[in-house]
Image (cartoon, rainbow, N blue to C red):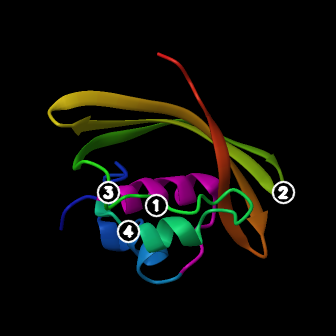
């Protein structure tokens, strides 16, 4: 069995799979962030939309319109529970577009609503 794209070294079916495919709520903001990264690698726009807070959700994610992305890896730098309903996750996601390497370093914000973590927004760190 191959490891989950989120970098956990755990099989997809025991890691992000239950959240993405099974409708199970991610237990922490970090688990949700990892599953959202995995959903990006799979092009799963439905899961991304379902886990985005509706007040922050873009009208269209344009994943099908974007140039092909080869996702190279995820590094979670920090997960901080701010209070019962709020958390942040700092991460670096690496990818290649058209053979050119890119990295996204972001501190994302999450909120817990009705037992489900949702992504709100994030701050991108300059290089």
Q: Position of residue 51 (x, y in %)?
A: 59, 67
Residue depicted at 30% across the width and 63% down the height: 42
Residue 65's disc is 3
The residue wearing badge 1 is 35
Tell me the quadrant of the picture where the N terminus can be found.
bottom left
The residue range painted magenta reads 24-41
**Image position of 81 (left or right of 126):** right
Q: CA distance from mark 3 to mark 2?
A: 37 Å
The residue wearing badge 4 is 44
Q: CA distance from mark 2 to mark 1?
A: 21 Å
In the rendered image of this protein, does residue 105 appear above or below residue 112?
above
Q: Nearer the viewer, mark 1 or mark 4?
A: 4
**Image position of 112 (left or right of 60):** right
Q: CA distance from mark 1 to mark 3?
A: 22 Å
Q: Earlier in the sequence, mark 4 or mark 3?
A: 4
Residue depicted at 78% across the width and 76% down the height: 114
Residue depicted at 30% across the width and 55% down the height: 5
Q: CA distance from mark 4 to mark 3?
A: 14 Å
**Image position of 51 (left or right of 109):** left
The residue wearing badge 2 is 84
């Amino acid at each position: 069995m191959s490891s989950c794209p989120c970098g956990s070294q755990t099989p997809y079916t025991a890691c992000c799979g239950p959240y993405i495919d099974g409708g199970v709520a991610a237990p922490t903001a970090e688990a949700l962030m990892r599953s959202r990264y995995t959903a990006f690698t799979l092009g799963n726009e439905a899961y991304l939309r379902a886990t985005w807070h509706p007040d922050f959700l873009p009208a269209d994610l344009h994943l099908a319109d974007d140039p092909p992305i080869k996702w190279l890896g995820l590094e979670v730098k920090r997960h901080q529970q701010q209070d019962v309903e709020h958390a942040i996750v700092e991460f670096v996601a690496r990818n290649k577009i058209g053979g050119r390497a890119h990295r996204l370093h972001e501190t994302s914000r999450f909120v817990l609503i009705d037992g489900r973590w949702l992504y709100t927004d994030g701050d991108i760190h300059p290089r």
